[in-house]
Amino acid sequence: MEKRELVILGAGPAGLSAAIYGRRAGLDVLLLEKGMPGGQINITDEIENWPGTIHSTGSELGMSFRKHAEHFKAEFRDCTVKGIEIRNGSKIVVTDKGEIEAEAIILATGAAFRKLGCPGEAEFTGAGVSYCAVCDAAFFQDEVVAVIGGGNVAVEEGGYLTKFASKVYIVHRRDEFRADKAAIEQALANPKIVPVWNSVVESIEGNGVVEKLVLKNVKTGEISDLPVAGCFVFIGTEPIVGYLGEPNSLVKQNKAGWIITNDRMETSVEGIFAAGDIRDKFLRQVVTAAGDGATAAMAADAYITQQLHLRSVLMEPEHVYALISSSIDQNQVTLQVEAEKYGKEAGKKIVFVDGYRNARAVEKIGVTKLPTLVELKKGQIVKTAEAKDIETVKAFVA
Ligand SMILES: Cc1cc2nc3c(=O)[nH]c(=O)nc-3n(C[C@H](O)[C@H](O)[C@H](O)COP(=O)(O)OP(=O)(O)OC[C@H]3O[C@@H](n4cnc5c(N)ncnc54)[C@H](O)[C@@H]3O)c2cc1C
């Protein structure tokens, strides 16, 4: 099977930033992308909050991210990730173009628009139902369209649609928008925007293309028709995590499916990191995705280096005595210094492992308490003892 050091799933801002940092750290980096590298920014009209660039179109920024990663010789593969499996301790990425064994994986497949789930939505997607104003607004020149939703994206994209459409209804289940004050004021001041409060979409109907929405008033229960040529759905996003199996089946996710990481972008599975919009986080933007990607790549680099080091000093030799202790506990640091001195004087080879920094790796061989002494033969633990003091160390290796 193909073996790679760092496999990054998704080439959006998070994945591409991870690739740049990974390559510059000297890792062998493979990026798997099912669509156009650049991710969601490819469908963004204008970006004005990427530091250093006052204004750019999304596709220009996406292209420059891609070129940057290519400059550092990250390898791209056009494929769809279907699953991730742990087989005999190895991490396997399953794609529609074969399987790859990875030392470390970064999940950076981003988020997707949430669907309404009503009759007609799937049928008319691409025939009047859209999730991207920038992509499709121009098809609705002088037409009447509806936006569904009440958050920032709904309100802002509604404003964008008025550049093309003659009228934009914003259908919202509540009686006020949930967007920023400035965005709301701007939308309500726009004569082409007409809010439709307390309403949900029951169905989308038409003949080949969208002709009307059937709405239900959530307060009165009244059903009414809203004739429109287009329906833009902006009711939030959800993480793209389907390839991980059922929720919580591989890496830990919150109730809504967003992946939980620590500040090193480590997931609940050792060697699997997550970056960008896919994470459970406060702000989903290009700048935060790029920061996550950089952090994940550096954490993956540290992980791979530690793994290789631990494999060479602990698992591969015929016979090893090791003291696994914590580098942040002064007593344990002192014990290590004494043990090093004793090893040299007595001609005993003792391997020292920082069990604090390599907590997950040492847990894998069964060490959960520090400091611990272990004796390994061909990677298998044959003896362990609590390293109480230097006398215990001497007795253990005698
Ligand atoms: C309309 C719109 C406007 C926006 N405007 C702004 C803005 O002005 N400023 C800003 O900072 N942010 C903006 N954002 C948000 C920003 O685009 C995202 O926060 C950012 O793109 C997240 O990056 P990411 O790498 O985490 O995910 P994404 O950009 O979503 O990239 C994920 C990549 O993974 C790929 N992928 C998914 N599943 C698979 C699979 N199974 N196999 C292989 N590949 C897969 C996807 O094709 C995609 O390329 C906007 C988003 C949208 C939708």
Image: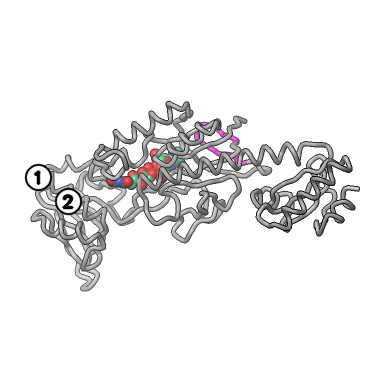
Residue 225 x, y percent position in the rendering: 16, 60
- Which residue is disc 2 drawn over? 159
Question: Is 394 on the left-hand or right-hand side of 356?
Answer: right
Measuring from the top left, give residue 234's x and y in whole percent: 28, 53
User: Observer-nearest residue: 159 or 97?
Assistant: 159
> Badge 1 is on which residue?
142
- From mark 1 to mark 2, how far is it between C-alphas? 14 Å
Q: Residue furthest bottom?
A: 220
Describe the colour scheme in one phrase: one colour
Question: Considering the numbered disc 2 on the image, is that residue within a helix, a strand or a loop?
Answer: helix
User: Does 350 appear above or below 25?
Assistant: below
Report the quarter where the N terminus lies.
Answer: top right
Image coordinates of residue 263 in percent, x first then y, are 50, 52
Quadrant where ligand 1 appears: top left
For label 1, the SS is loop
Residue 100 lies in the magenta-colored region: yes
- Towards the viewer: 153 or 249: 153
- Give, as a single range, the part of the protein colored magenta: 91-101
Across and down, in percent, residue 208 comes to: 21, 44
| Quadrant in the picture for residue 305 | top right
Examine the image and state in which quarter residue 69 appears: top left
Q: Is residue 85 magenta-colored? A: no
Is residue 66 positioned above or below 343 on the image?
A: above
Q: Amino acid at mark 2?
A: Gly
